Image (cartoon, rainbow, N blue to C red):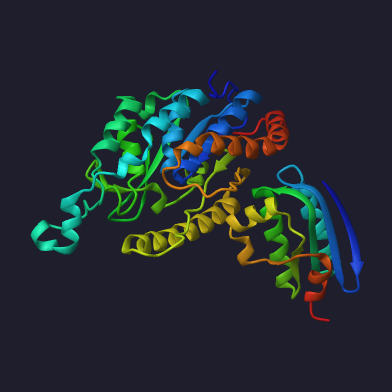
């Protein structure tokens, strides 16, 4: 059963927005499970960074078990095992090795291969639910929203983690991770006319120990993106005319970048957090449907 | 959502039970507006029984904070539950609101 909305024109428009958060984004599958069980339809899905993977899987109509299995095959520690030696050397000898905007410490051949194995040649516009995936223009900092084109390319751009994966070129633009412009892109759903926005996003974890230049850089990135998350979310809450429901799972354990073995636990917590919002979501939908909320 | 109001000297304590969301925010705004228009501009929102707040709830809080501060008062929160605190933190509201562990400390925080 799909979560594509069966509602008639004139009713509420429900969006699910999945922000960045790597493995924690699997909590979206818990949300999906609850929405399906409750028969709550979704009119659009927005995904960013790790959330873009789950947004695409859900929009393509995969059930929770299938999506979980697919992401466990996709996202493993081996993805970062092969270094991009030329890029690394270019840090120390920039002229000799030609340091440029395509810097990324990890060889991205495997992630690309895995994305292709997961999504094939599927396009964004072919998804069962309108899908929007976000990335960030490396040169201008602007948010870039993909509404069409190959899912693989859009996700590759959306998960171009700074320093780790090289920026991804699409249409003449170099694109980096979507979280750099908005870690939880609620604004996309507002712009697309959603009135009830169910959103799930996560703060970037802070380093437990700063014992390398990379950890130092990641720490700075987390500080910036977490403050960006809060300021954007504050603005969207105040700017939106209707309702934004944040679903915030609570993880007792720290979830690391490749803790894929914790995905079942992450899904459970996502389900639990979503269940807490179901009574209100139901009342809200009933009220909006009665009032014939304009699209 | 249930709202009860209690005067503690010059401070008005507005205790809220339930969710502060799109279904209830209008009632909460009305309640706050009634206090502010009656000159009660030093308000403590007792959030110990608030289970959840959504964007509509945040907008209600912001309106009241702005109204009270424009008139020299304030809206301060007390006893915020962990679920609500997470939303307040995520939305940056902890930067602009004064939040206290309980009503007593929030009431005491206002100058005599």
Residue at image position (53%, 57%) is A230
As displayed, is residue A286 above or below residue A204?
A: above
Farthest residue toward the bottom? B112
Residue at left offset 77%, top offset 60%: B79
Q: Is the residue A170 above or below the residue A2 in the image?
A: below
Residue A207 point in image, percent of width and height: 44, 59
Q: Position of residue A128 (x, y in %)?
A: 45, 23
Residue A166 left/right relative to A74: left
Q: Quadrant of the C terminus of chain A?
A: top right
From the top left corner, tell me how far across and down residue A216 is, in percent. 37, 64
Q: Tell how many labels.
A: 0
Q: As drawn, is A68 to the left or to the right of A124?
A: right
Viewer can see residue B19: yes
Viewport quadrant of the N terminus of chain A: top right
Q: Nearer the viewer, residue B112 or A7?
A: B112
Residue at 47% across / 37% down in the picture? A261
Q: Position of residue B65 (x, y in %)?
A: 71, 65
Give A208 or A150, whichever is nearer the viewer. Answer: A208
Left or right: A197 as drawn, with respect to A175: right
Judged from this view, the residue extending furthest toward the top is A1
Q: Is residue A127 above or below residue A256?
A: above
Residue A16 visible in the picture: no
């Amino acid at each position: 059963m799909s979560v594509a909305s069966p509602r008639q024109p004139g009713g509420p428009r429900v969006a699910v927005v999945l922000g960045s958060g790597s493995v924690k984004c699997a909590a979206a599958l818990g949300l999906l499970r609850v929405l399906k069980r409750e028969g709550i339809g979704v009119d659009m899905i927005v995904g960013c960074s790790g959330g873009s993977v789950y947004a695409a899987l859900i929009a393509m109509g995969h059930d929770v078990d299938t999506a979980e299995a697919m992401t466990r095959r996709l996202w493993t520690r081996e993805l970062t095992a092969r270094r991009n030696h030329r890029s690394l050397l270019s840090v120390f000898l920039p002229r000799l090795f030609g340091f440029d905007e395509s810097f990324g410490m990890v060889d991205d051949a495997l992630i690309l291969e895995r994305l292709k194995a997961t999504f094939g040649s599927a396009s964004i516009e072919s998804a069962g639910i309108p899908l929007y995936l976000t990335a960030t223009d490396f040169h201008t900092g602007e948010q870039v929203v993909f509404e069409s084109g190959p899912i693989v390319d859009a996700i590759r751009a959306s998960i171009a983690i700074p320093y780790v994966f090289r920026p991804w070129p699409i249409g003449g633009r170099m694109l980096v991770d979507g979280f750099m412009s908005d870690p939880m892109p609620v604004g996309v759903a507002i712009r697309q006319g959603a009135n009830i926005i169910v959103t799930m996003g996560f703060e970037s974890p802070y380093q437990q120990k700063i014992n390398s230049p990379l950890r130092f850089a990641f720490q700075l990135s987390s500080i910036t993106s977490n403050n960006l998350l809060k300021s954007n979310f504050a603005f969207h809450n105040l700017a939106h005319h209707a309702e934004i429901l944040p679903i915030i799972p609570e993880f007792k354990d720290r979830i690391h970048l490749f803790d894929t073995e914790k995905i079942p636990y992450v899904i459970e917590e996502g389900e639990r957090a979503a269940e807490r919002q179901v009574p209100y979501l139901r009342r809200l939908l009933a009220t909006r449907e009665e009032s014939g909320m304009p699209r | 959502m249930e709202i009860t109001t209690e005067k503690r000297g010059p401070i008005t304590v507005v205790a809220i039970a339930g969710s502060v969301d799109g279904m209830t925010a209008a009632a909460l705004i009305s309640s706050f507006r009634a206090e502010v228009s009656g000159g009660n501009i030093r308000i403590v929102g007792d959030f110990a029984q608030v289970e959840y707040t959504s964007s509509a709830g945040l907008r209600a809080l912001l309106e009241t904070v702005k109204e009270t501060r424009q008139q020299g008062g304030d809206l301060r929160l007390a006893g915020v539950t962990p679920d609500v605190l997470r939303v307040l933190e995520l939305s940056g509201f902890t930067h602009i609101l004064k939040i206290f562990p309980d009503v007593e400390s929030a009431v005491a925080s206002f100058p005599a």
